[in-house]
Image: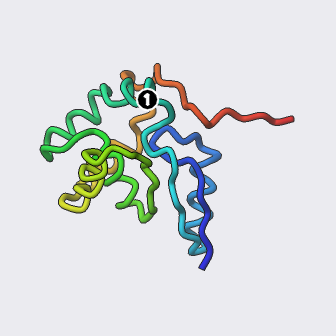
Amino acid sequence: MSVNQIQFNPWAPDRIRKVAEYCERHEIVLTAWGPFQGTMMQHASMFTVQTLKEIAEAHDRSVPQVLLRWTLQRGYSAIPGTGNPKHMADNLGVHAFKLSDEEMKRVDTVRDDPGAKRLVAFGFEYNAS
């Protein structure tokens, strides 16, 4: 078995999504780090995106839980990273609900959401040199 650990979240640019698709086609397990999109400041901004808030509300969950659930339903493992016991418990709560196909599609395209366009895709900078 092979594993590829890459930064992956709904803001992943097309070139990163192509890596994920390659992994899927070749049965390479993808481990997503940075599922909440970068720094704490970016987390705070990301958690205000209306689309994500609506999905979270529908399940009586938090936006971070929705993002982790989305990652797992894609068949990936995730490294949310926290030292906070409450956040650890919240992270484990993602196994108690599922997103519908429609909700999965909404999260898949959240980077195109007008309310999310202002967010920087931290960590996905590309240096061609």
Q: Secondary structure at mark 1?
A: helix
Q: Position of residue 8 (x, y in %)?
A: 52, 48
Most foreground residue, 17 or 48: 48
In this rendering, position of residue 101 left or right of residue 20: left
The residue drawn where x is 35% and y is 46% is 67
Residue 70 coordinates in the image, percent (x, y) = 35, 52
Q: Identify the residue at image location x=56%, y=75%.
A: 27
Q: Is residue 105 above or below residue 46?
A: below
Residue 24: x %, y % from top left: 54, 67
- The residue identified by callout 1 is 40
Residue plotted at (45% across, 45% down): 35
Q: Is residue 1 left or right of residue 40?
A: right
Towards the viewer: 34 or 52:
34
Colouring: rainbow
Q: Is residue 119 left or right of residue 20?
A: left
Q: How many marks?
A: 1
Give the quarter of the figure containing the N terminus: bottom right
Q: Name the quadrant of the C terminus.
A: top right
